[in-house]
Amino acid sequence: MTGTGNQTDHSDAISRLQRLQFEAVPNEQRELAALPGLLEGCERFIDVGANVGFYVFHANRSLHGAEIVAIEANPVLRRALEETWEHARTDSENGNRFKVESCAIWDEPGSIEFYVTRNLDDSSAFSTRIAEATKTAVPTRELDAFYQPLKKTLIKMDIEGAEYRALKSARRFLGCGHAEFFVELHPFGDAAIRKYPLQVCNLFFRNGFACERIYHHYHFVKAGIAYRTLLYLSVFPHLFLLWLSNRYPGRLVRTVKQLHGFLANVRRRLFP
């Protein structure tokens, strides 16, 4: 389904997503266990792709007197984010300040078409990732618009494959020494510009960041060349296979089939 505006009733989907932040979600447990350590000493937490505020809620428990910025492109979720913050303040009143920014983080300011799915989980800026969605225009901003000097900042990012475009707009964050990133790298990446998780990690590496995998997410932090090279080599095989399978899916399938046929023929000759 395509169209404009926010005509679909998403109340059930929003309620389902809101319930998750108060439960132990299996595929987020490792990230949540790591979050307090990642936030240690931080004065700011920027959640890019905040959804209903799952990480906002848990970050509020670890931060004290900090600024929490929730950035969400899906206009359907703004009210849900504000409700999450009210729950977070009731849960832990730590003197944190909160604000919601309704925009997509992109490589240039302006606007894009955003595709809102019925279940909201996989809403995206990429129509090719979505079988059924409602189309709406959303404003775009560069990540550097939220930069503040000399304040230790953790930037969490979950934006359904648009990571490379967002990071192109973060030159000040990438160049400073007081920002860390906690990013979910989606294997399908951004096919339109041929940028996948491997290219995202390469961009971080060139800017002096080491990469540590934490379940579905990757933690990027400034480090010396030896340490960041060692960590890069540890994640490269996995990222390379992801790149290969998503960049050349048809060719890869044919290659695997040819290899399988070759090995089967070898087995027949060796063990007639």
Image (cartoon, rainbow, N blue to C red):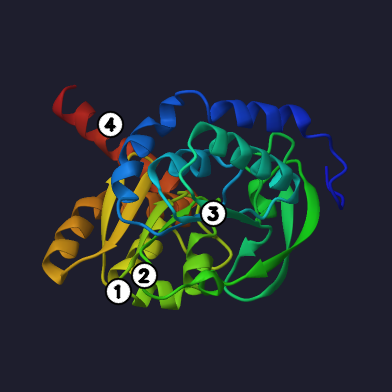
Q: Residue at x 19, y 30 (%)?
A: 269
Alpha carbon of mark 1 to alpha carbon of mark 4: how far? 43 Å
Mark 2 near mark 1, Cβ–Cβ under 8 Å? yes
Which residue bears the numbered disc 2? 203
Alpha carbon of mark 2 to alpha carbon of mark 4: how far? 41 Å
- Which numbered dot is residue 181? none
Q: Secondary structure at mark 1?
A: helix
Q: Earlier in the sequence, mark 2 or mark 4?
A: 2
Which residue bears the numbered disc 1? 206
Q: Is residue 19 above or below residue 121?
A: above
Which residue bears the numbered disc 4? 264
Q: Earlier in the sequence, mark 3 or mark 1?
A: 3
Q: Residue furthest left?
A: 226
Count the labels in the image.
4
Residue 241 in the image: x percent, y percent? 34, 50
Q: Amino acid at mark 2?
A: Leu
Q: Earlier in the sequence, mark 1 or mark 4?
A: 1
Mark 3 near mark 2, Cβ–Cβ under 8 Å? no
Residue 268 in the image: x percent, y percent? 23, 27
Neighbor class of circle 2 (other Cα within 10 Å; few <14, some 14-19, many 20+) is some
Alpha carbon of mark 2 to alpha carbon of mark 1: how far? 5 Å
Which residue bears the numbered disc 3? 97
Q: Closest to the observer: 190 or 72?
A: 72
Q: Is residue 33 left or right of residue 73?
A: left
Q: Residue at x 16, y 69 (%)?
A: 224
Q: Nearer the viewer, mark 3 or mark 2?
A: 3
Q: Earlier in the sequence, mark 3 or mark 2?
A: 3
Neighbor class of circle 3 (other Cα within 10 Å; few <14, some 14-19, many 20+) is some
Q: Secondary structure at mark 3?
A: strand
